[in-house]
Each structure stands twice: as structure tokens, then as C-alpha cells.
Image (cartoon, coloured by chain):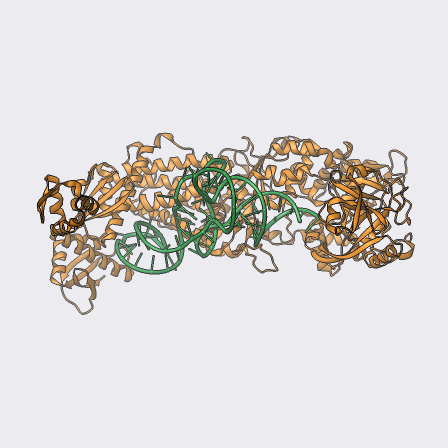
Chain colours: A orange, B green
Amino acid sequence: MSEENENERTSGLSSSVSLEESVLCHWREHEVTGRLLEHNKGGQYFRFLEGPPTANAPPGVHHIFARTVKDTVCRYRNMKGSFVPRMGGWDCHGLPVEIAVEKQLGIENKDQIEKYGIEPFIKKCRESVFSYIDDWSRMTERLGYVLDLDHPYITMTDQYIESVWWSLKEIWKKGLLSEGHTIVPYCPRCGTSLSSHEVAQGYREVEDPSIFIKFKVMGQDNTYILAWTTTPWTLISNVALAVHPDEFYLVIEHKGANLILAEQRARVLLKEGEYSIIRRLMGSDLEGTRYEPLYSFVKPDRPGHFVCTADFVTMEDGTGVVHIAPAFGEDDHNLGKAYDLPMVQPVEADGTFSEAVTPWKGMFVKDADPLIIEDLTQRGLLEGTHLYAHQYPFCWRCDTPLLYYARKGYFIRMTQLREGLQRNNRSITWYPDNIKNGRFGNFLEEVKDWNLSRERYWGTPLPIWKCPKGHDHAVGSIEELKGLSGMEHIPELHRPYVDAVTFPCPKCGETMNRVSYVIDCWYDSGSAPHASLHYPFENTEEFHNQFPRDFIAEGIDQTRGWFYSLLAVSTAVFDKPAYLSCICHAHVLDAEGKKMSKSKGNVVDPWSIFASDGADAIRWYLLSNSAPWKPKLFSVDGVKETNRAFLSTVRNVTGFYRTYADLDGYEPKDRTEPHSRPTIDRWLLSRLNRLFAELNSYMDDNNLFQASNAIQAFAVEDLSNWYVRVNRRRFWGEEDTAIKKTAYDTLAESLQGIALSMAPFAPFHAEKVYLTTGMELGPSVHLLPYPAPDITMADEDLEKEMANLRRAVELGRSARNAKNVKVRQPLSRCVIKGAGPFNPELTSIIASELNVKEVIYESDLSHYFDMTADPDPKALGMRFKAQSAIIKEQLLAIDTKDLASRVKQGTISVNLPEGSQELDSSFFRFHEILPERWVQGIEGEIEVLLDTEIDEPLLLEGISREVVRRIQTMRKDMDLPYDARIELKLSGDPLVIRGIEAYRKYIVDETLADSLTMEETPEAKDWDLDQGKLRIAIRA
RNA sequence: GGGCCAGUAGCUUAGCACGGUGGAGCAUCCGGCUGAUAACCGGAAGGUCCCCGGUUCGAAUCCGGGUUGGCCCA
């Protein structure tokens, strides 16, 4: 191999970042990403769908997490033989984009947008959408996320919109898309309804007037139903009262009037003796009771003003009777639909009362509260006023209190599809599985009709045209629109262009105009399975190949977002689930567990991590720390730790292999038959194949956490810390031996196995390890099959044996430590019980790890112990009472070992005042004592003894190793290359000199010394050994 | 205000579906090893398994209540 190739192969192993840069070059050069997108084409599909981000803000660490999860799963399936199309996607529409543009233009409401002009406004939106697309593309490549960004789906293209239109028309044809009312949070100042997300930002605790109002029952004198509200201004619009059907209500006499309220509330609100009970009845008994309206400014268009029953009525506050104004509350509105109540809406878009409300017309409704209270008080209809503290939403932009308003809009009747949604949900595998019946399942149970319409500008226009007679027509394609309108060219499908398109009503011939709405952008992304392929206008076969999708993964916040909109659209249009498995990952929080946000300044910039530790470190950190659905407390130190503990180990083993393989000219060809390799090699390969088996089963269940941990454990514990450590000397030998060749073969195969195993998780390191190992099976590890276990290599017994051996070595080291005997000091023997006996090859590992001359296996260790005995005070006391003290004194004078052997052989006599007494073994307690020269390490069944007696040869050998170590330290301090030759001049105490002389050859060999003279020189460095003084001088 | 998830050593966490003396890694301290590694090996110290109650011979684990945090929704 040429010098150049050598450099190329080992370059980039020094750090994560340089490694990844070299791999990125390699990928670009060999077009690896492009190949992966085509890889296994024609084979079985793994049908993945990328959730489209909006590229109007730069990506953060949480985007990295989602992409890591998606990439890892897709890479695995790709290596397992599936074709994995990975079309990129961009979500373009929606209020956040409009708001960003408003900010940019320095405007803040719809009037100003219209003044600015819709056409230039949406042009700005179009530009704004991709303002950070370069950041996203660069991040995607740098992270190693395989995604087709050259042919992405883009939700604002006419093609995409056309597919969305098609699906809406399908839904419309089924009668599931129609006009209706809904209650939306509305800011009267901004003149717009707010999304739930915006509303959530503005909740505050406030105090509002809370009043008790008497509604006079029709046909009954002096009898009133007592209701309660915190929004007096909605009383103008009251059309019903609601009670709980299954609670008890009382008719009471109170201060001269008959009042009806819930029994539980009466007990809370009124003092005993203030009232007397006339009648007790169920809420359901009150249903239908008619009462006199409080106000009649607006004539209702259908019957109202009677008592309804509703489960949402609580006994927590109020009177157990809820005033119902269907125009101003969601519960009210739903109840209104159930009872076909009239809708009284006397409030203008700016939040003021309309002309009809004569006394307060033009007044902001909340400002009218005190006047309405005053009016009711004068009419004698108020029973009390308090201030009531509760949570109320305010506009996040202008801090105006929001009103809940009935607004017209177009709805998809999801309530009619509930069962279909639930059935389709049942065929989805959720990670974690509690989502299925928990968060998502609960949501589907209470699914509401989907208000699709938005009174905005930048979005997919709702493709519904209406004529003055109220007929409506849904348009399902560009062709259809052209046909209906007779226009040959429609500039684009966005507002305002599409608003200008009109056509005669198919039913009455009058001119149809498009309704002005755009649609909820969640419908756009929910249409991705078909709209990304421009189905059904193109790609019909490809669509059917890819539907439903096998896999999606996004953050848990998408439960009611994309996860829902995908299922909603697919259920409404195709009556199928859109996806069959879904990983919901948790959020990436800062190191303190707080949400990352710009305002807190705790957002981590992915590029700073890429620059310091690289993409694999962040990927591995996020995947191996805990399951994806556990929140990630993100710390840069954690990423560094991952780099240090795992990735750098992988790099170093690879570097070790490459360095020596190049010295020896080794290539991983014509490798030895694995079954005939040394025991420790077969052990490593058994571990490797077991790893493969585990990984396949983990990954088939999307268990990224266990899989990555299994890889790390193998690479760090088995390969680096044990196999390489124990076998280092096999690679150092000068001559080409079979034992050396097999070591290379085994190491090369293991590195290859690690490269393949980790490829989906840490694609850069995997590639580098693969390329460095030199297997030469193609340009990229990612194009190779994921490793399948070779069960003929699995040897469970051998693995157990090795585990025991490693445990025995640990115990031996622990024993050395207990007596402070350095490993450098050779010892004569160790004795092992409970592990082994091992074959000579494995035994030699123990001998070298523990630095002992001999390893002895025993099943019984008792003969290594001394038996001692001491008098048993309990036995003596019971037999000899007060005299036992005399006996004890005599016995303690005898050596305990002596005592034990004498008692074991017979009895022992002691002198008492009345004569001598023979004591047998029942008066003694026996102990096993390990003689001083031995140390013991013990755990469970395994027991290790070390003989610590150091005779003269061992002592001298120990000295020689001390000397070698000092010389090596000095070589290192001098920054000598590891193969540099040196001249040595040594001097010191007589004992140290004897050690040097006795092991002269060993010292010369180990330190690569050309000469060793016993000579005192001034430049020599002083060392203090346990065995005496040493002075060393080295000349290179 | 409602729903879901979580709280384990200074830090990051495993264990919990199926109850039986709570394991790792990092950090700290002591000792060792070192011709791949900012590596490694041995040891020490560090725990009210968030709190209260219940079930049980026995609870980190199961049940109920609370609390703190995260998420979703109002």
C-alpha cells in the first residue's frame, strides 16, 4: 500500500469532527446519499413519510432529535433490504408565516394587510417560507439524515393544492364537508379568531363579576329559576337554561320568593334556616320548563327559553343551573344544536353591541357588564353579586380580552367519522403504546367537527364556490375549474388569483363566487400521503405502493396535530389509517429540564455541537440515553461524554488496528476459518453474533435505546477493554505467526460487525470504521445488508466461561489491592475455586492479567486455611458456671491453632480446684483463618487466593519491571517514537542493581535499548522504588 | 380547570407489564496499570427510590390521595 493510501485510511480518526468531515467528502464523492434513496428499488417497500417542517425559522436541537429517530429507523430498514423512499417535505402555509411577514412589514392586523394588498402580501409569505431553507438543508446533510431534498413535496405548489382540493371534494361528495357555526376564541380588536395555540399563550387569572339571576318560570307566580354567570353581557343572548339530569334540585322558599336551584349548591350558598324546602326533584324533571326571557332585543327564529339537561353542568360552583347563550360558548353551542335552540348574536365583529340592543348599542360588551347588572337589579331579578377569580384568555398580541364567538365556517363532520377513526387507530402500532388508548385514543373519543376554514390569506384556498341562492359547489381539480369558468389560464391557486374566478351555478345559473376562506394548514400536511405524489392526477401506482405508510415519527405535540390530521384525512377520504406505526418522541429540554425557548435564551444551536463533537455524538447521545419518548435533558457535557466513552473508543480501536495492520501489511483477505481460531477469538465472535441477534430483534420493534446500548456495551466492554487489551501482544510480535494473523482476522471482522451494527445510528463513524477496516465490499457500509447472526458461532457455554474468568481476574486484582501488592510485582501462584479449570490458553490470560507464575484450580480450599479454636463462653458457662473464668484463662494461654489441632484429635485438660477436667470439642468454637501469606477475593461461588510471599527471584523480577516502567515513562516524557532505539545508563542501590543485572535482557528488549551500561551520570533522573534508589539516563 | 407522562446517588439514568437485600456511567477520593485510547483496572464514599396512606409475610415496583416538573388541551 502506498504512503498516500495509508494516510487516507488513518486520517480522520483523531476526532469526531475531522472523521465526519472526511466521511462527508467520501459520501459526496461517491454519491452515497443518492444511492441510498435508490437502494433496493424494486424490492419490498418500507413506506416512510417525512413530516414537513416550516422553513421560516432555523432548526433547533429538537428537530435534530426527530430526524435522528427517523433516519435511524429508515437506515435500518434500508439495510434490511427494503426500498425506502424518503421524500423531503416543506409545510408552507399558515398563520405563523403571516405573522412573520406582518412583523417584517411592521403591520399587525387584517385591515392593514388588505390595505397593503393581498397579492404583494402572499408574495412576501412565499418568500418568507423558505427564508431558512439553506439552514435546514445544511443541517440535514451534516446530521447524516438521508432525505430527498431535491424532489420534496411543497404544500404551496399548485400540484399539491390540487391534490388537497381533490380530497376535499371527495369529502364534500360524501356530505361530510359543509357550512356551520362554531364558537371560536376571537379578538375583537384584531378582528380575527385565534388558534388554540395562540389562545393558550394568553391565559391569565382575572376577577370578573359573578351574578345570580332569577329567571321567572312561566305560568307560576313568584317562582324563579336561579342561574349564575360570570359574563353578564351574554345574558342578552340567553335562550335556555341547563341543569344536570341526574342531580337533585330543590324548590325553596327564600326571602318571600320561590327559587329553584341544585340541592348541593343550596347547602353551600344559603345558611340553614334562611330557606325552607317546598319540593325536591331530579334535574331531568325540570326539562322543558318554560321561563320568561330576560331581554327581547332580538326575536329568536325558533322556540327557546326553556330548561335543557346537560352533563357539563357541575356542582362545583354557581347554582347548578347554567345560563345558555349558544352564540358565545362552546358547550352552549353544542347544546343549542342538540336542542335546536335559536342563536341570538347581537354583537358586532368589533366586540360592541349591535343596533338592536338599544340601551347599550356601540358599547364594548365587557364595558356593558355593570350597566346590565344595574338594570337587572332595578328589575329585582338579581339575587347577589360577587367577584369571581378564574382563568380567562387574552389576546397575546394586544392584550384584549378574547370573546368566544359563533362564527360561520366550513366543517368536516369528524363526529360522524368517529368510529372509523377509532377503528383505524386500532391498526396503528404506537411507541410508546400508551398513546394509542391514552392521549390519542381519548382525543378520538371526544372528537369534534373539524373547523377547516380560516379567515386569512396565506393558505390553501377552500375550493368551494357559492351562488347568491346558497347553492355550493366544490371544485376538485384545476381542469374542473377551467371547465367551469371557461378560463384557459389560472395564474395560481392561491388568493387573490383564485378569488377572481367565477362561474355560473350548475343548479340555478347565477354567478358563483369562491367563499373567502383558506383552510387550516393542518389539512395540508394531513394530505401528505396522497398530495406529496400529486395523486390522483399522477403516480397512481406509486401512491398505492406507498399507502398506508409504514412509519412516521414526530414529537408528542403532534398527537392532535399531524398525527391526527393524517388519520382524519385518510379516514375521511380512504377510510384507512395513513400510517401503521408511529414513534412519538418527547421534547428536548435544557439541562435543567426547562423547555427550550428563545426568550429564556436556553436554546442550543445544533451547529455548535456539530462543530465541537459532531453529528454522531449528538445522535448517539439522544438515542442511547433513554427511550425516545422520555424527555431529554440536553447537556453539552452529556454529548461530550458520549463522544469520549463510546465514539472515541471505536475510533481508537480502529486506529490501533490500522496502525499495526499497516506495519504488518495485513489485509483482511483469505481469513482463517472462525471455528478454528483461538478460544478468545471464538468468544469474541460468539459475543458479536449474539449482538447481531439482539439488534435484529430490538430494531424490528423500533427499540433504538436497547439496540444502541447493546452495541456500545460490545464495543467498549468486550472488544476494547477485554479482547484488545488481553491480545495486544499478539499484534506486536515481529514475525508473522498464525496467532497474529487470526488476531487481525478477528479484530477486522469485529470492527466490520460494529460498523454494520452502528450504521443506522452513527452513520459517519460506521462508514469510517468500515473504510478503515479494508473489507472493500463497496463504497459504503450503508449499502451493505444489516448483519444477521451466524448461529454456528454462538457458544453460550464459552461466554459463561469467559464471564467467570473475567470475574476471577477481577477478584484477583481486588485481592492484590487489599494487601497493596502492585500488579507489577510477580507472584508465584493464584488459586481459583468456582471458576474453570480453563484451558491453557485462557489460563495464560489469568496468569498475565494477575501477573502470577502459576494458576491452580481447586474445588475445595479448606487446606489453604488454618483451623483455630477459642473457648465457647456459652458452652463453658452452662457447664461450669463461675469456674468458667478460670478455665478460660488457661485456654487463652494456648495458641489458637495449637488448641484447634489438639481438640480435633481428642480432649484437652484444664485444672480446676477439685481436680483436672477434660474438655472435648463441644466447648470450643472453630474458625478458618487464612494464613498471612495469602490474600483472598470472594464473590458468590467464585473465590480467588493469591500467594503473596515474594522470594528472591520474584523480588528481582519485580524490580526489573519497575525499572522498565520508569524507563518507558521517561521515553514518553521525551516524546520518543515508540520504535526509537535508545542508550541506557543505570545506577542505584545494590538490590536494584541486582534486579537489573538478573533481567538485563528483558529490560533491553522491552525498552528497545541498544546498550545498557551500569554507570553513574550527572544528567540521570532519580527514582525512588520500594526496593531502593534508581537513577536512569536515556540517550536517544 | 381537565387529560397524558415522569420524579431513583451531586449529575444522566436502568430496573417497574410479572413485588423478594436497588444496578450502571459521569463527577469525587484512595490505590494500581499503561509500546491504541483525554483510555483502562481495583476499591471507597454517595439512596427517605418525591410525600402520605393502603394491599401484602414482604412495595422503587401494585392501589388511592397529594406534590413537583414536562407535555397536550381548555
Q: How many marks?
A: 0
- Residue A13: image x %, image y %? 40, 51
- Whether residue A633 is visible: yes
Furthest-bottom residue in view?
Answer: A1018
Q: Residue at x 54, y 44 (%)?
A: A629
Which image quadrant for residue A204? bottom right
Q: Quadrant of the N terminus of chain A?
A: top left
- Residue B39: image x %, image y %? 35, 52
Furthest-left residue in view?
Answer: A915
- Residue A2: image x %, image y %? 35, 48
**Front residue of this view, candidates A101 and A902:** A902
Is A601 left or right of A93, judged from the image as shown? left
Q: Quadrant of the C terminus of chain A?
A: bottom left
Which image quadrant for residue A351? bottom right
**Front residue of this view, candidates A31 and A848:** A848
**Front residue of this view, candidates A683 and A327:** A327
Q: Residue at x 55, y 48 (%)?
A: A140
Furthest-front residue in view?
Answer: A914
- Whether residue A156 is visible: no
Is A658 left or right of A145, judged from the image as shown? left
- Residue A949: image x %, image y %? 15, 50
Is A536 left or right of A660, judged from the image as shown? right
